[in-house]
Image: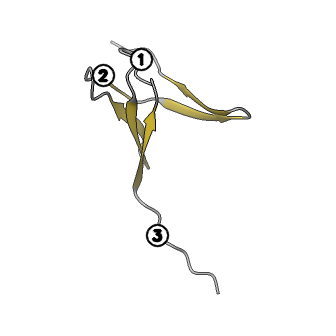
Amino acid sequence: MFQATPQPESRDFMIPEGCPACAADLPVRVSAAGPSGVCKHCGWMGRPLITVTHKGLRVTYEGAAA
């Protein structure tokens, strides 16, 4: 009999040199609402777009909208 194991509601990752503002390591939390990141060095906040490619993960950031 198959028994489902509960999945965590969110997962935390660190993207080395991932901050687009200061190039510091960027902590990212991925939840059901999508990824979000806040740089502990400069305070940049955003929602990176994470795409799986044949070479690995690709992280991009959308431009700000006024």
| Disc on res. 45 | none
Residue drawn where x is 44% and y is 14% of the image? 63
Q: Splitting the image into 4 quarters, where does residue 39 fall?
A: top left
Secondary structure beneath dot 2 equals loop
Depth order, front residue of 38/33: 38
Tell me if residue 34 comes above or below residue 16 in the rendering: below
Q: Height in image: 7 above or below 14?
A: below
Kindly give the residue lying farthest to the bottom in the view shown.
1
Location of mark 1 (residue) = 20
Q: Which residue is mark 2?
A: 44
The answer to whether marks 1 and 2 mark residues whose Cβ atoms lie closer than 8 Å is yes
- How much space separates mark 3 and mark 1, taking CA atoms? 34 Å
Residue 44 position in % (x across, y down): 30, 22
Count of labels shown?
3
Whole-percent x and y of residue 57?
61, 34
Amino acid under label 2? Trp
Q: Secondary structure at mark 3?
A: loop
Q: Which mark is residue 6?
A: 3
CA gap between label 1 and label 2 equals 8 Å
Identify the residue at horizontal 40%, vertical 52% (top origin).
10
Q: Position of residue 19 (x, y in %)?
A: 40, 22
